[in-house]
Amino acid sequence: MVYDINLREIALLRKSVGMLYLEHHGITDHTLVIQIDAKTHLKFDGRTTVKFIMPVTYFHRYRMQYDLREGLFAVQDIPVGYSFIPWDERLLNDHAEVKFESFRNELDASVFPCLGEEDGCRRLMREISCRQGFIPEATWLIRHSANENTADPDHPTIQKPKRYENCGTVQGIRSQTDVGTIQNIGISQTHRGKGLGTLLVYHCLKGFQEAGVRFVTLEVTSHNTGAFRLYKRLGFRVLKTVFKSVEISY
């Protein structure tokens, strides 16, 4: 029996997985003959089963819940220069951009690899916004204006184009009749530490409340201690501990 495996495929596999394991069955002389032909194929002689094994690790995550029947927490005013923009399908790429900037260097990009890729974030936003339970009222974008004064000082009657930067995103989905789920709360790194995460959660919860949801859940990786402490301070309670298995590439 001969098994042909393209070397380019193996190279890609080794790059993405890091290890290549071969299991040999029924080889009486414990010898595996490998030949490379002109077409760059590996040929395995003998009764050989080729098996690829992905290294797997498990991430400890908390599933938390907020009871909207108890009302919403108080929040500070929105910082100067920032605005909260409700969902509009034309903003899909803006949400995806912020999602990528917020998560690409974080542990969550290992737990959910799509968060570490620009195309992956766009696909994820399309999937979320097309789901039957998608709640636009609980989906928000934060935008920061780069220049507050848009007037040209040399020509006061001429307005300079107003520049802005998208810096925060959150999405909401109804998972059951009275239960909603928060998706991917993200604040880009240069805009953290200003209370925007709290305000983003508040706007999201208020949207769920307006949509008739009573309980809102989210998940957070235990290593993300800052986010976990924030959610507890805002009134989320731990429902259960879950473990997310992830195939890790090296």
Image: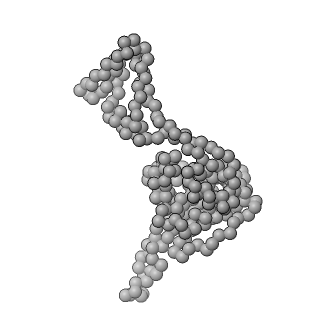
Q: Residue at x 44, y 51 (%)?
A: 117
Of 61 and 138, nearer the camera is 61
Q: Horizontal and vertical percent for residue 157?
A: 42, 87
Q: Residue at x 73, y 63 (%)?
A: 71
Q: Horizontal and vertical percent for residue 59?
A: 55, 44
Q: How is the image coloured?
A: one colour
Q: Residue at x 52, y 65 (%)?
A: 192
Q: Is residue 177 left or right of residue 39?
A: right
Q: Horizontal and vertical percent for residue 3?
A: 36, 22
As drawn, 38 above or below 140: above
- Residue 24, by quadrant, is top left
Q: Residue furthest right?
A: 69
Which quadrant does the N terminus fall into?
top left
- Residue 170, by quadrant, is bottom right
As drawn, 41 above or below 60: above
Of 35 and 237, nearer the camera is 237
Which quadrant does the C terminus fall into?
top left
Q: Horizontal and vertical percent for residue 163?
A: 43, 72
- Residue 242 at least partly seen: yes
As drawn, 25 above or below 242: above
Q: Is residue 183 left or right of residue 115?
A: right
